[in-house]
Structure formats: C-alpha cells, structure tokens
Image (cartoon, helix red, strand yellow):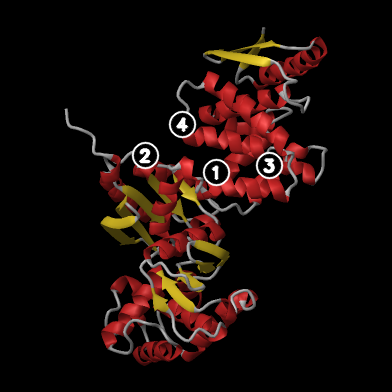
Amino acid sequence: MSKRPANSLLPWASIDIGSNSFRLELARLSGGRYQRVSYIKESVRLGAGLDAQGNLTEAAMQRGLACLQGFSAHLEGIPPERVRAVATQTLREALNRNEFLARGQVVLGHPIEVISGREEARLIYAGVARLQPSEQPRLVIDIGGRSTEMILGHGLKPALTESFGVGSVSLSLRFFPDGRFTPEAFRAAQIAAGAELEEALTLFRPERWQEALGSSGTVGAVAQVLAASGRTDGRITPAALRWCMEQCLAAGHQDKLQLPGLKDDRRAVVGGGLCILYTLLTQFDIPELLPTKGALRQGVIFDLAERLQPSDGRDARAASVAELQTRFDVDTDQAERVAAQAEQLYRQLVAKPSRERLSELRWAAALHEVGMQVSHHDHHRHSAYLLAHVDAPGFSTNQLQRLSQLALGQRGGLRKLGAQLADPALLEQLVALRLAVILCHARRAGAGPAPRLTRDGQKLLLSCEGTGSADLARTRYLLREEAEAWARSGVLELQLS
C-alpha cells in the first residue's frame, strides 16, 4: 500500500470561473512560501454567452462544462478540503446560473461557489499582498470580463473593497460588437466606463495610496504588449495606452490588429479593456500601473489554507460573523447558548460531522436573531433576508444563502423552505437549530433541559430531563408544537419521550 503524502507536500487547488477565462492553479504552501505546481488557463468567454434575457446560452454552458471536465482530471488525489472553485460576475448575473452550477459541479467533482464582487476583491488583494508584499498603502485594480475590482490596502489587510459592473467582455460586446475600431466607439466606451466608475473617485483618490498595481487578465495582456513592443518595461501609462488605441484605429478591425505580444484570445476584448484602463488612469490620476503576480486564484488558495488552521483565528468568516453581531446588536449570550445546544444535538444526529457543516450551524445560530434589529415580529424572515443580501467577507453567496435558509427555518411552519428540505445535510442542521432555539427559549444559562436525540431513519426521538417542572412544562408545550410542524411537513417524524 502506498503512503499518503505528508500534508506539506499535498497541493492546494483553486478554480477561477471567470467571465472571459477559466483558470486552474495547483500550488504548495510551505513555511509561508508559495510554490506553483501547475497552471492552466482556458479562454471560455462565458460572459459573452449571456442572452438578451440574462440567461446563459446552451453553447456558452457547453464551453464552460467542457473546460471544467478537463480540469477535473488534474484534481484527482487532492483531498476535497484543499480544492475550491469560485465563480464571478457572469454567474452573479445569469438568471439560470443554478442550472450551470448543478451541471458544473457534477463534471468538476467539487462544489462551485459564486462569490460577491467585494469578496472577489478581497481575495484578489489576498493574492497580491502575499505574493508581492509591501508596507506602502496601495491601490490594486483587476479588470475582468464583466466586472472591475478596486481595492485599497496596507500590508496584508484590505481597507476598502469595491466591485463595478463593467469589464472587457461586456464593454467590447457593447461598443465593438463587430470587431471594428472607430474613434466614436472608443469615446463612447470610455464615457460608459467613466460613468460606471465615477462614484469611486473620492473613495480611491490619489492621496490614499502610494503605488498602483494591476492584477490578472486585461492588465497582464496590455503589459505584455507594451513590453514586447518596447514602449515600456511592462508598466502601463496613459501615453502608452493612447499608443495602443492608435494602433487599434490604424488597423481598423480586430482581425487586422498586429500588436506584439497580443494573444489571439484577447483580440475580441482588447478594445473594451483598453478603454477601462485608460479611463481608470485618467480619472483617478494614476501616473502608472504596475502589473503584479498575485490574482484571485492565489488569493483563494491562501484563504483556503487559513480556513483549515482554526487555531490561529484567521478565517475571515469568523470575523464577519462577529462584525454582523455587533452591527445588528445581537444578544451574543443567547446566540452562544443556542450555538452550543445546536452543536450538541447535531453531533448526536451526525456521527462524524464535517468541520464546514458544523461551522455553518454555529454561524447560523450566532446570527439567527439579526432580524430583531428590524422587527421582533417575524424576525426570522428579516434575519433570512439580511443574511441572503449582506456583504460578509469570507462567505460565498452560496453559503450566505444556506445561512439564510437556516435562519428562515428556525421557527414556524416548514413549507416555506420548499425543496430545500430535500437536502439531507441542510435538514440535519435545521433540526438541530430549531430544537436548540426551543430548548433555549428561556434565554438564561442553565434554564433548559439536557436533551438526548436519537435517529432511526426518518424518525427522531428526543428525550429531555429538566431541572424545574415549570420550565420543563413550557418546553414540552413548545416541543409538542414542533413535533406537529414536522408531522405536517411529511419529511421527518419527531417523537418526544
């Protein structure tokens, strides 16, 4: 039998499902050093496959699925907890994204998480800050296919993260749809980009940073052109961008464009990318933009590694939960009582719970009452809405949606959860959370009974021993109502002993 490699030798894997390109990166982390094992980039142009109704076309989905199928072969032998796939703006926008995610997860063999624009920006900065460390205040810019991220940061910490809905693919499709370059199209594209970015002028003003860095696709492609043509050493300046646009106008069409270092897969999006870059440099008074090594895919790997080191407290999600508790004035003592009780019940239901599912349950318990800041009436519905729509660093939109469903289902009827009840993992978390909320209803330490929960298929048996008859009588009343709610759902049967 072959020995499993030591943890330090096992690679980490990140899959960046972008609007223009899909990227797979395998790397090892050892002693703070990042060592790339392999890197694959495929031009998929998923963002160009959104139709007029906002749905991904079947052709675009097939391109994406074929790429993910190819990536899956490179992930064999890597433990699932060391693999993370994230999707960005196109799948944030696509109305039929769930169809693509379901199919994509099957061919990839791993979950795919859709991340918010601000979370994308945070992860971009994580990659840049660790691969190109500096103590100077810096501005980091990443121009993707359908969005542009801007980040202010110092050292390893991002101070401000923003995402704007303009990218090289979307702008090129709108203003250079037939591949023709005209002065009018360049002017119109720059005005459109400027209008999208204008609200950030004060936030990212020059006095707030000392160096400007550009990450990933568009910046890297333009930097290569400038270096290959001898215009600069790779740094991007307004004058160099004007030269690039002059070359586009002289060619007249993307097919005739002969820019040194320009790869064929960039031709269709170069017009939009140049317009966004030029708008950024001129509107934000950026004298030069330096290409940087770090990008989203490396940030995903660094962040994933930190998640698996719970003792050092660097999981960004834990900090987000604490910040949300403060923002919404959560009763943290009650939240901790519910979390502890829910974990105890969950461990009785699930013999070997995964760390991620257990963490989700505790986070849901920690935040189940955030909606009380809106109204005590139906606070679970307000909690669900807030968790589904809040920006929370570290969380994907998928995971926030899961916390939202748990918050919605913490009390009351179960029909409102619909098809979500068919998810066995969510169902187990939900049972533990609902029972914990009931058992801790007195909102004081030591007031609740000690529960014992056993399971036989779809039948649950809950037995409790109370310390006070009055407390126990009130709890039994609530538990009988809970048993009736599950009976009406037809999903589980809850029996009380």
How far apart are labels 3 and 1 at the CA level?
Answer: 12 Å
Mark 3 or mark 1: name the one nearer the start of the chain.
Answer: 3
Q: Nearer the viewer, mark 4 or mark 3?
A: 4
State the residue in front, 408 or 333.
333
Q: Amino acid at mark 2?
A: Pro
* Label 2 SS: helix
The answer to whether residue 176 of the structure is visible from this angle is no
How far apart are labels 4 and 3 at the CA level?
Answer: 24 Å
Q: Amino acid at mark 4?
A: Ser
Note whether 405 is above or below 118 in the view shown. above
Kindly indicate whether the residue at mark 4 contacts the one at mark 1 (C-beta within 8 angstroms). Answer: no
Kindly indicate whether the residue at mark 2 contacts the one at mark 4 (C-beta within 8 angstroms). Answer: no
* Label 3 SS: helix
Q: Residue at x 36, y 43 (%)?
A: 82
Q: Which residue is mark 2?
A: 80
State the residue in front, 388 or 252.
388
Q: Which residue is mark 4?
A: 354
* Label 1 SS: helix
Kindly indicate whether the residue at mark 1 contacts the one at mark 3 (C-beta within 8 angstroms). Answer: no
Q: Which residue is mark 1?
A: 399
Q: Residue at x 76, y 25 (%)?
A: 441
Q: Nearer the viewer, mark 1 or mark 4?
A: 4
Horizontal side of residue 266 vs 137, given as left or right: left
Q: Amino acid at mark 1?
A: Gln
